[in-house]
Image (cartoon, coloured by chain):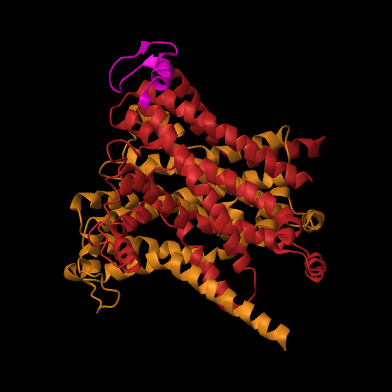
Amino acid sequence: MKADRRERGIRLILYLPTLIFLILMSIFPLIFSIYISFFNYTLGQHMDFIGFGNYGSVLTDSSFWSALRITLEIAVLAIPIEVFIGILIAFLFNTRGKGVEVCRMIILIPMMLPPLVIGFFWKYMFDATFGIINYFLGLLSGNPQIISWFTDVRLALIAIVLVDIWEWTPFVALLAMAGLQAIPPNVRETVRLEKASWWLRFRTLYLPYLRFPLLVAILIRSIDTLKIFDVVYILTGGGPGEETVTLTMFAYRVGFNYFYTGKAAALSWIIALISVGLITILIRVLSRKSTA
Amino acid sequence: MKVTTKRSLIFGIRMAGIILVTVVFAFPLYWLFATSLKTRVQVFALPPKLVFSPTFANYLQVINSWFMGNLFNSFLIAALSTIFSIAIGSLAAYGFSRYPIKGSDNILFWILSLRMLPPIAIVLPLYVLFRALHLLDTHLALILIYSIFNISFTVWLMKGFFDEVPKDVEESAMLDGYRPLQVFYKVVLPLVRPGLVATAIFCLIQTLIEFLVALILTNRVAVTATVGMAKFQVLGVEWGQITAAAAIFILPIIIFTIFVRNQLIRGMALGGVR
């Protein structure tokens, strides 16, 4: 009886600070944000109840659909390439040696850097006149290149995708390497002895161990792409025009450039719901693995 | 004989591939540091100068500019948020690991999903609230918001480290007369110290590199390094200064990353793949 009460005391001490903080700082604001989303509310002015009007205004806004499309395009272009190159890098680095360790460490640095800083130095490298990228392209093609990367929608999108690939391929590779290291040595030996074709070996030996880490990588990358902001903010500023405004950037503009607080609240709920969908899938995947 | 030549050929190709990949991924970083050491004339040289005599003029300019104040803000905010998050987050993590409550799993998943939620979804209502409380553009506002993400990260990561501590260590400590909280502080915490340090470093990095929330919530007083850097855009094409500021900013982050290199999967993929 006494021990019971003491155990309850311990639980209170352990859980209460975190739960109170997170409820105050997240659940409460999110509920408040639903409330705001039902009002026609420009920050600093008075609020008019309009029901689902803000949601309607978001869903009929062509800028919203354009932002959603750009965000999806970045994801659809970048993630498969990151997965493909990531697998190649994982196989390449799947060996021992001090030099290999150092190289692995070096390629893992980009994903830890501030995306904003990454945006800055890539912007310099993409510079039409003084940029090193056009210089290299000039060397490769034999005549000087003055590609203006950020005045054409397609090129701007490619630039964003290239930076994303540089930033996140090592992350996919890191997960894939962990998958490869989980292969028991004896399994590897048996397959090496059978003179199976490269593709067959990949499918039967490696793929089963890569499937789970790659699924996790793809899900995490998808969730992250919904948040993409910093790199695009610096690199293209959403331009040319508004052609590369991403979902998060659109919400930022509605909320903090135009101060349509009600509409921004509706929008941030729509973004949150899309994310929660993906996050739920990710968590299902993770927990199925840990109980299996 | 034939087999060995084939083996060494494959080895050679592999090493060449590793070096190529490393050079491709490292080159932008090299170019960042190189540019920061160039004079204005060298920055705009055509063709770009790959080799040159370095100058520290850009660094001197950045060190004497307002950017250092922003950098100080960033480190202060990151440190305070990390200390707060580790303090209360590791308590909860220990709870989830050793004293589960009703619905523990669901609460844990809720906490995890908070960390992955787009910041824009949470920051909007908090902006309205903080505005009413006159907390906009304060260090406190940023520390509070970053702590949402850091606490949820700490709970998730530290639970993994606590789970790895064998239960009999605690049981024998209990038999020695330790009270449960003493077991936590005196026996378990020292055992998970490496995990605690790694978690703290991840929290620091993640707070230092954040931009969107800081952009929205700060204006003059609490401006962080990322927001300060974004202001360099106004300077236009002062790439020497921009890259010098970037270099000063990311050097500590690179050092932190090297410290946690063996925990990167746990930290970046939610311990998902082990």
Nearer to the camera, B100 or A12: B100
Residue B234 place in picture, x, y as percent: 20, 49
At x 39%, y 55%, the residue is B75
Q: Where is residue A4 in the image (x, y as percent from the top left)?
A: 79, 36
- Residue A49 located within the stretch drawn in magenta: yes
Write the residue at 43% across / 23% down: A266
In the displayed structure image, the side of residue B61 where residue A222 appears, left or right = right
Is residue B23 placed above or below B92 in the rendered structure?
below
User: Which shade is chain A?
Assistant: red
Task: Indicate whether residue A38 is drawn in magenta.
Answer: yes
Above or below residue B181? Residue A103 is: below
In terms of depth relative to the viewer, which is nearer, B149 or B113? B113
- Left or right of A47 on screen, residue B201: right
Q: Residue B139: percent from the left, percent from the top?
A: 36, 44
Q: Residue furthest bottom?
A: B1
Nearer to us in this view, B260 or B4: B4
Residue nearest the viewer, comparing A179 with B18: B18
Quarter of the image that includes the N terminus of chain B? bottom right
Q: What stretch is highlighted in magenta?
A: A37-62
Report the residue at 21% width, 69% height from top. B46
Vertical side of A257 occupied by A289: above or below = below
How many marks the image carries: the answer is 0
Give the image location of residue A195, x and y in percent.
Answer: 79, 68
Q: Which hue belongs to chain B?
A: orange
